[in-house]
Image (cartoon, helix red, strand yellow):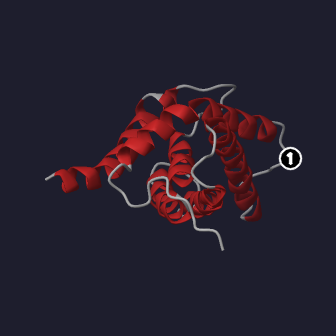
């Protein structure tokens, strides 16, 4: 029974984050920019669990995010998977990283994700990255995710306690 509960922790966390995103945080905005908790979740999974866990969490969270957005289906999934894998590369630094470094990685990763989404929408002819709000968008999302990172890291660590990917270091080659 304990293994089943351990296996359900991370899926329940992503569903909880989705519900909070679209019920509570979705109505909050800073300069008409909404925080992205699903992106925060992906970044935290990547920092805690590594590149494979980050990419899988990015894909699943992206599909969930795209279910509620008017952007082309798959855009968030592609960007979140890429960011999850990219931030998951931080596992090469070992398990002795500081919380500040993890927070910084999450904030920068969130900002890069916003830039990539805007660039992808521009390529499809759906967005203009030269608008004045572009800079504000990625600064706000990156900043909010930086501030909320310690809470999400704790939740993800708790959710991945039974996992074999929890805070493992990659052997040196």
Q: Quadrant of residue 83?
A: bottom right
Residue that sits furthest to the bottom in the current view: 173
Q: In the image, what residue occupies the spot 34% across and 52% down?
A: 11
Q: Is residue 151 above or below residue 76?
A: above
Work out whether residue 18 can be spotted.
no
Above-or-below relation of 69 to 34:
below
In this figure, what is the number of numbered marks? 1
In which quadrant of the rendered image does the C terminus lie?
A: bottom right
> Residue 3, image x and y in percent?
21, 56
Q: Is residue 133 left or right of residue 171?
A: right
**Residue found 60% across the figure and 63% down from its top:** 85
Quarter of the image for residue 72 reads bottom right
Which residue, given by chain and number where applicable, does mark 1 sit on? 130
Task: Point out residue 98 in the picture as x, y percentages from the top left corner.
Answer: 63, 39
Nearest the eye: 54 or 117: 54
Between residue 8 and residue 75, name the one nearer to us: 8
Residue 128 or residue 108, whichever sits in front = 108
Q: Callout 1 environment at 10 Å: few (<14), some (14 to 19), or many (20+)?
A: few
2 relative position to 166: left or right: left
Residue with the most extreme front position: 172
Q: Residue at x 57, y 65 (%)?
A: 170
Q: Is residue 20 left or right of residue 105?
A: left
Tell me where residue 54 appears, x and y as whole percent: 53, 58
What residue is shown at x 64% (from left), y 61% (from top)?
Answer: 92
SS type, badge 1? loop
Q: Is residue 117 above or below residue 144?
A: below
- Residue 25 visible within the image: yes
Quarter occupied by residue 145: top right
């Amino acid at each position: 029974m304990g293994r089943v509960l351990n296996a359900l922790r991370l899926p329940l966390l992503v569903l909880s984050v989705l519900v909070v995103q679209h019920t509570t945080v979705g109505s909050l905005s800073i300069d008409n920019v909404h925080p992205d908790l699903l992106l925060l979740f992906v970044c935290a999974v990547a920092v805690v669990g590594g590149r494979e866990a980050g990419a899988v969490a990015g894909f699943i969270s992206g599909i969930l995010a795209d279910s509620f957005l008017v952007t082309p289906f798959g855009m968030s999934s592609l960007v979140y998977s890429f960011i999850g894998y990219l931030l998951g590369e931080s596992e090469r630094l070992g398990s002795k990283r500081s919380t500040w470094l993890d927070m910084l990685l999450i904030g920068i990763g969130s900002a890069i994700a916003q830039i990539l989404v805007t660039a992808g929408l521009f390529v499809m002819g759906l967005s203009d990255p030269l608008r004045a709000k572009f800079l504000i968008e990625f600064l706000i999302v990156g900043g909010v995710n930086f501030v909320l990172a310690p809470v999400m890291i704790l939740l993800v660590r708790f959710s991945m306690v039974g996992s074999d990917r929890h805070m493992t270091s990659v052997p040196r080659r």
